Image (cartoon, rainbow, N blue to C red):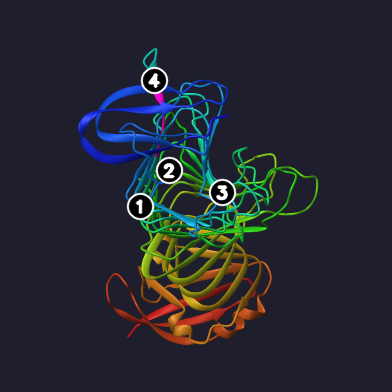
């Protein structure tokens, strides 16, 4: 095992060296040509090319890099503070890693905060073999605490850019979790994970684990890049190792979700088989600028295990988030603020409306359970859109005139809004009600008259 932590300081134009150290092996110096001054920091080794020792850990003035090492073991990079230090945090300027094998940046009980002031970048070390781009070994990277004595807060004040153009490999990037990537336990979970800007992913599986299951925030967009040889960027919202249950729900708050090309990206959970009935759920809360995500949102990443349901919350006032891809998830869709534009498939969804607006792009949507206390449904009547209520509804809205928005209205034409097999008692509040609605396309005002039958709620329009 080698414990190495590289540090670069801006320096004069001159060659520099980096040192590699493997336990039980000799120190080797490798000379390169560059405008930066490189030194390796580690628990066991401290060497600078100019011969003057500095602090025993990187500081906010330093840009930290990981350079691929040709070794036959995985390297564990430990962030170690001197035992007599009064600080419990490390701040560095930026972080860049070109990973060839599996690396881990592990905080100890002496550290409770790791802050990257600018950008975090991770790339897979690749080579061209027979005209194909091949990734080296695992090309995995993990940042997190090493044991329960450390509740590590990871803060990235800039952007996160994780790239991999290898055509034969989808590596892992783990924020929290164990060194067995994607297998969480109570010993290796972050106390918090915050990214203040944007998060871009290419052909990598991203795992995010937190100590309390809710304190993970990415303020900007999560952008899923174009797949490489049909290998998608994948966000795992909740995961476990199939042996130790810790988080029943993992929530990640994001500014928005976006795909650079149609269909790019997967958002899911990853639950191991335990032979019990426990469910490990994932939850995305959209609370920023929104975006246009056309990738796949699904329950468990494993097709063999149906546990690990995804849930989505729309909570971004005056903004729009489009989920226009393959929405296979079976958790709850919460609409609280803003407009959620949704592409439904032929499966029933669970919808809870307490504000905002919900629009769907297909002709019909099937809803298993509907809870509706506020907010509005948006109908494009040119598409003959209908909501099919499969099970039950709990509707307690106070203002019917603010509960729907319409486009494509035709006068003296009756449109079914809800269809159902059994009478829904909560729909009786609409029976024989009259409200004015403005066609959002034409601006013309119509009077809408609601009618409730044994199997449908319909509306008939007359021009005012």
Observer-nearest residue: 141 or 307?
141
Q: At which x and y percent is residue 56?
A: 44, 45
Q: Which residue is mark 4?
A: 127
Decide: marks 3, 2 in contact (CB < 8 A)?
no
Residue that appears at 34% across and 50% down: 93
Cα–Cα gap, marks 4 and 2 = 28 Å
Decide: marks 4, 2 in contact (CB < 8 A)?
no
SS at mark 4 in the image: strand
Query: How crowded is the residue under tag 3: few (<14 C-alpha within 10 Å), some, or many (20+)?
Result: many
Q: Is residue 400 above or below residue 170?
A: below
Observer-nearest residue: 116 or 86?
86
Camera-near label (4 vs 3) is 3
Camera-near label (4 vs 1) is 1
Q: Which residue is mark 2?
A: 263
SS at mark 2 in the image: loop
Residue range (magenta): 122-126
| Left or right: where 458 falls relative to 369 | left
Residue that appears at 56% across and 48% down: 176
């Amino acid at each position: 095992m080698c414990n190495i932590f590289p540090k670069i300081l801006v320096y004069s134009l001159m060659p520099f060296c980096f040192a590699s150290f493997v336990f039980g092996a000799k120190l080797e110096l490798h000379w390169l040509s560059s405008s930066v001054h490189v030194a390796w920091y580690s628990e066991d080794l401290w060497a600078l090319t100019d011969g003057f020792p500095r602090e025993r850990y990187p500081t906010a003035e330093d840009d930290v890099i990981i350079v691929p090492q040709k070794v036959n073991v995985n390297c564990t990079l430990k962030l170690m503070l001197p035992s007599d230090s009064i600080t419990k945090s490390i701040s560095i300027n930026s972080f860049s890693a070109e990973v060839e094998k599996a690396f881990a940046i592990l905080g100890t009980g002496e550290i409770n905060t790791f802050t990257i002031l600018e950008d975090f970048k991770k790339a897979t070390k690749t080579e061209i073999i027979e005209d194909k781009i091949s990734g080296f070994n695992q090309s995995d990277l993990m940042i997190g605490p090493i044991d329960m004595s450390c509740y590590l807060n990871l803060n990235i004040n800039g952007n996160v850019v994780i790239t991999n153009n290898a055509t034969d490999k989808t590596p892992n990037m783990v924020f929290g979790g164990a060194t067995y990537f994607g297998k969480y336990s109570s010993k290796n979970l972050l106390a918090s994970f915050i990214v203040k800007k944007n998060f871009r992913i290419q052909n990598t599986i991203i795992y995010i684990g937190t100590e309390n299951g809710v304190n993970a925030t990415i303020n900007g967009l999560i952008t899923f890049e174009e797949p490489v040889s049909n290998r998608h960027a994948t966000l795992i919202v909740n995961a476990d190792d199939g042996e130790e249950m810790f988080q029943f729900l993992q929530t990640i708050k994001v500014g928005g979700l976006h795909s650079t090309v149609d269909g790019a990206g997967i958002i899911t959970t990853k639950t191991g088989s335990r032979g019990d009935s426990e469910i490990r759920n994932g939850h995305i809360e959209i609370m920023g600028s929104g975006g246009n995500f056309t990738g796949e949102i699904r329950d468990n990443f494993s097709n063999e295990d149906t546990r690990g349901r995804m849930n989505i919350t729309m909570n971004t006032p005056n903004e729009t988030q489009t989920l226009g891809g393959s929405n296979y998830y079976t958790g709850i869709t919460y609409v609280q603020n803003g407009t959620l534009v949704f592409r439904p498939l032929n499966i029933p969804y669970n919808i809870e409306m307490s504000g905002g607006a919900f629009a769907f792009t297909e002709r019909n949507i099937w809803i298993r359970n509907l809870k509706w206390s506020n907010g509005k449904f948006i109908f494009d009547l040119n598409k003959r859109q209908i909501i099919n209520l499969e099970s039950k509804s709990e509707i307690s809205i106070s203002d019917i005139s603010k509960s729907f928005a319409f486009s494509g209205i035709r006068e003296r034409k009756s449109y079914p809004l809800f269809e159902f097999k059994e009478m829904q008692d909560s729909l009786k509040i609409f029976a024989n009600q009259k409200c004015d609605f403005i066609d959002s396309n034409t601006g013309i005002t119509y009077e809408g008259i609601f009618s409730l039958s044994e199997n449908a709620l319909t509306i008939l329009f007359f021009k005012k």
